[in-house]
Image (cartoon, rainbow, N blue to C red):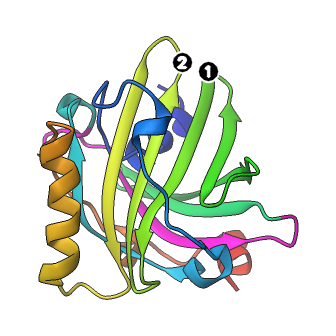
Amino acid sequence: MTLARGWLLFLAFNINLAQKNLEEVPVQPDFDSRKVEGRWLTIQLATSHRDLVLPTDPLRLSLYSIGTRDSGDVDFVLFEKGEGICTGLNVTVHPTGLPGQYQGTFEEGSMHVHFVSTDYNHLILYVRLEDNEVINLWALLARRMLVDPTWLGKYLVFVERFHLQKAPIFNTADKCPPHKDLDEATA
Protein backbone atom coordinates (compact mmCIF):
# COMPACT_ATOMS: atom_id res chain seq x y z
CA MET A 1 0.00 0.00 0.00
CA THR A 2 1.47 3.36 -0.97
CA LEU A 3 1.60 6.21 1.51
CA ALA A 4 -0.81 8.27 -0.61
CA ARG A 5 -3.34 5.44 -0.80
CA GLY A 6 -2.99 4.84 2.94
CA TRP A 7 -3.71 8.48 3.68
CA LEU A 8 -6.60 8.54 1.30
CA LEU A 9 -8.03 5.52 3.04
CA PHE A 10 -7.73 7.36 6.35
CA LEU A 11 -9.02 10.67 5.06
CA ALA A 12 -11.91 8.96 3.48
CA PHE A 13 -12.40 7.92 7.07
CA ASN A 14 -13.47 4.47 6.16
CA ILE A 15 -16.75 3.48 4.59
CA ASN A 16 -16.97 1.02 1.72
CA LEU A 17 -19.98 0.90 -0.56
CA ALA A 18 -22.24 2.63 1.96
CA GLN A 19 -23.45 4.99 -0.76
CA LYS A 20 -24.16 3.90 -4.31
CA ASN A 21 -23.43 7.33 -5.81
CA LEU A 22 -22.19 10.78 -4.90
CA GLU A 23 -25.63 12.36 -5.31
CA GLU A 24 -26.79 10.66 -2.10
CA VAL A 25 -24.28 12.70 -0.06
CA PRO A 26 -25.36 16.25 0.83
CA VAL A 27 -23.11 19.31 0.89
CA GLN A 28 -23.09 22.44 3.02
CA PRO A 29 -25.16 25.21 1.39
CA ASP A 30 -23.07 28.37 0.81
CA PHE A 31 -19.87 26.52 1.78
CA ASP A 32 -16.85 28.84 2.27
CA SER A 33 -13.61 26.86 2.03
CA ARG A 34 -11.55 29.67 3.59
CA LYS A 35 -13.46 29.25 6.86
CA VAL A 36 -12.35 25.60 7.26
CA GLU A 37 -8.68 26.53 7.16
CA GLY A 38 -6.68 25.57 10.23
CA ARG A 39 -6.23 22.79 12.75
CA TRP A 40 -8.83 20.01 13.09
CA LEU A 41 -9.21 17.03 15.41
CA THR A 42 -11.02 13.81 14.59
CA ILE A 43 -13.94 13.21 16.95
CA GLN A 44 -15.64 10.26 15.19
CA LEU A 45 -14.94 8.02 12.19
CA ALA A 46 -17.34 5.65 10.49
CA THR A 47 -16.98 3.01 7.82
CA SER A 48 -18.46 -0.13 6.39
CA HIS A 49 -14.89 -1.21 5.57
CA ARG A 50 -13.55 -1.32 9.12
CA ASP A 51 -10.61 -3.57 8.29
CA LEU A 52 -8.93 -0.58 6.62
CA VAL A 53 -8.21 1.02 10.01
CA LEU A 54 -7.87 -1.73 12.58
CA PRO A 55 -6.66 -0.90 16.10
CA THR A 56 -3.97 -3.57 15.69
CA ASP A 57 -2.53 -1.99 12.52
CA PRO A 58 0.83 -0.30 13.33
CA LEU A 59 0.18 2.41 10.72
CA ARG A 60 -1.61 5.49 12.10
CA LEU A 61 -2.81 8.33 9.90
CA SER A 62 -4.39 11.50 11.20
CA LEU A 63 -5.69 14.73 9.75
CA TYR A 64 -3.76 17.69 11.09
CA SER A 65 -5.15 20.67 9.21
CA ILE A 66 -6.97 21.99 6.17
CA GLY A 67 -5.71 24.84 4.00
CA THR A 68 -6.87 26.58 0.84
CA ARG A 69 -5.17 28.14 -2.16
CA ASP A 70 -6.11 31.15 -4.27
CA SER A 71 -7.00 28.72 -7.07
CA GLY A 72 -9.76 27.26 -4.86
CA ASP A 73 -7.85 24.02 -4.20
CA VAL A 74 -8.07 22.53 -0.72
CA ASP A 75 -5.03 20.98 0.98
CA PHE A 76 -5.25 18.34 3.68
CA VAL A 77 -2.18 18.00 5.91
CA LEU A 78 -1.87 14.53 7.41
CA PHE A 79 0.58 12.67 9.58
CA GLU A 80 1.53 9.03 9.19
CA LYS A 81 3.07 7.19 12.09
CA GLY A 82 4.43 3.71 11.64
CA GLU A 83 7.23 1.75 13.25
CA GLY A 84 8.15 4.71 15.45
CA ILE A 85 8.61 7.18 12.57
CA CYS A 86 6.24 10.08 12.02
CA THR A 87 6.09 11.78 8.61
CA GLY A 88 3.87 14.41 7.04
CA LEU A 89 1.80 14.20 3.88
CA ASN A 90 -0.06 16.83 1.86
CA VAL A 91 -3.07 15.91 -0.29
CA THR A 92 -4.66 18.46 -2.60
CA VAL A 93 -8.15 18.33 -4.09
CA HIS A 94 -9.62 20.66 -6.69
CA PRO A 95 -13.07 22.31 -6.93
CA THR A 96 -15.59 20.46 -9.09
CA GLY A 97 -17.56 23.62 -9.81
CA LEU A 98 -20.25 22.57 -7.34
CA PRO A 99 -20.22 24.19 -3.86
CA GLY A 100 -18.53 22.10 -1.18
CA GLN A 101 -17.40 19.38 -3.63
CA TYR A 102 -13.80 18.62 -4.59
CA GLN A 103 -11.94 15.95 -6.50
CA GLY A 104 -8.40 14.76 -6.96
CA THR A 105 -6.37 11.88 -8.29
CA PHE A 106 -3.69 9.64 -6.89
CA GLU A 107 -1.55 7.08 -8.67
CA GLU A 108 -4.09 4.28 -8.22
CA GLY A 109 -7.37 6.16 -8.74
CA SER A 110 -9.46 9.17 -7.83
CA MET A 111 -11.09 10.74 -4.80
CA HIS A 112 -14.10 12.96 -4.19
CA VAL A 113 -14.56 15.09 -1.07
CA HIS A 114 -17.83 16.59 0.18
CA PHE A 115 -17.98 19.12 3.00
CA VAL A 116 -21.33 17.79 4.22
CA SER A 117 -22.10 20.16 7.09
CA THR A 118 -20.18 22.73 9.10
CA ASP A 119 -20.48 25.69 11.41
CA TYR A 120 -16.70 26.16 10.89
CA ASN A 121 -15.99 24.89 14.42
CA HIS A 122 -17.38 21.41 13.64
CA LEU A 123 -17.27 19.62 10.32
CA ILE A 124 -18.79 16.49 8.83
CA LEU A 125 -16.54 15.34 5.99
CA TYR A 126 -17.17 12.65 3.38
CA VAL A 127 -14.46 11.16 1.15
CA ARG A 128 -14.98 8.64 -1.64
CA LEU A 129 -12.00 6.77 -3.07
CA GLU A 130 -12.26 4.96 -6.36
CA ASP A 131 -9.65 2.57 -7.71
CA ASN A 132 -10.31 -1.13 -8.23
CA GLU A 133 -13.05 -0.72 -5.60
CA VAL A 134 -15.10 2.12 -4.10
CA ILE A 135 -14.41 3.16 -0.52
CA ASN A 136 -16.60 5.72 1.24
CA LEU A 137 -15.43 7.36 4.47
CA TRP A 138 -17.04 9.78 6.95
CA ALA A 139 -15.55 11.87 9.78
CA LEU A 140 -16.79 14.24 12.43
CA LEU A 141 -14.08 16.87 13.00
CA ALA A 142 -13.84 19.70 15.50
CA ARG A 143 -11.46 22.52 16.36
CA ARG A 144 -11.35 21.29 20.00
CA MET A 145 -11.60 17.79 21.45
CA LEU A 146 -14.99 18.48 23.05
CA VAL A 147 -17.97 16.47 21.82
CA ASP A 148 -20.91 18.73 20.95
CA PRO A 149 -24.10 16.65 21.30
CA THR A 150 -25.80 18.51 18.44
CA TRP A 151 -22.99 17.78 15.98
CA LEU A 152 -22.59 14.23 17.22
CA GLY A 153 -26.32 13.72 16.63
CA LYS A 154 -26.11 15.10 13.07
CA TYR A 155 -23.17 12.82 12.35
CA LEU A 156 -24.84 9.73 13.82
CA VAL A 157 -27.84 10.28 11.50
CA PHE A 158 -25.47 9.63 8.56
CA VAL A 159 -23.90 6.65 10.33
CA GLU A 160 -27.34 5.09 10.74
CA ARG A 161 -28.65 6.13 7.31
CA PHE A 162 -25.71 4.56 5.47
CA HIS A 163 -25.34 1.53 7.84
CA LEU A 164 -21.81 2.41 8.91
CA GLN A 165 -19.59 1.05 11.66
CA LYS A 166 -17.53 3.22 13.97
CA ALA A 167 -13.81 3.08 13.36
CA PRO A 168 -11.00 3.92 15.77
CA ILE A 169 -9.80 7.52 15.72
CA PHE A 170 -6.20 8.68 15.66
CA ASN A 171 -5.03 12.19 16.46
CA THR A 172 -1.29 11.50 16.24
CA ALA A 173 -0.18 14.93 15.04
CA ASP A 174 0.51 16.16 18.56
CA LYS A 175 2.87 13.22 19.01
CA CYS A 176 4.83 14.00 15.82
CA PRO A 177 7.79 16.36 15.60
CA PRO A 178 7.23 19.61 13.68
CA HIS A 179 7.70 19.28 9.93
CA LYS A 180 9.10 22.35 8.14
CA ASP A 181 7.22 21.92 4.84
CA LEU A 182 3.95 21.17 6.62
CA ASP A 183 4.37 24.15 8.95
CA GLU A 184 4.76 26.38 5.88
CA ALA A 185 1.72 24.80 4.21
CA THR A 186 -0.44 25.52 7.24
CA ALA A 187 0.89 29.04 7.90
- Residue that numbered label 2 is attached to: 131
* Closer to viewer: mark 1 or mark 2: 2
Q: Is mark 1 on a helix, strand or loop?
A: loop
Q: Position of residue 71 (x, y in %)?
A: 87, 64
Query: Which residue is at 33% across, 50% downward?
Result: 138
- Dot 1 amino acid type: Glu
Query: Which residue is at 49% across, 66% downward?
Result: 28
Q: Position of residue 88 (x, y in %)?
A: 56, 60
Q: Position of residue 110 (x, y in %)?
A: 62, 29
Query: Which residue is at 69% across, 34% downward?
Result: 105
Q: Where is residue 34 in the image (x, y as percent from the top left)?
A: 67, 80
In magenta stretch: residue 70: yes
Which of these two is toward me, 80 or 41? 41
* Marks 1/2: CA–CA distance: 6 Å
Category of crowding for the residue at label 2, using alpha-carbon neighbours closer than 10 angstroms: few (below 14), some (14–19), many (at least 20): some
Query: Of callouts 1 and 2, which one flags the residue occurring earlier in the amino acid sequence?
Result: 1
Q: What element carries label 2?
A: loop
Label number found at residue 108: 1
Q: Is residue 102 left or right of residue 122?
A: right
The stretch of residues the image draws in magenta is: 53-71
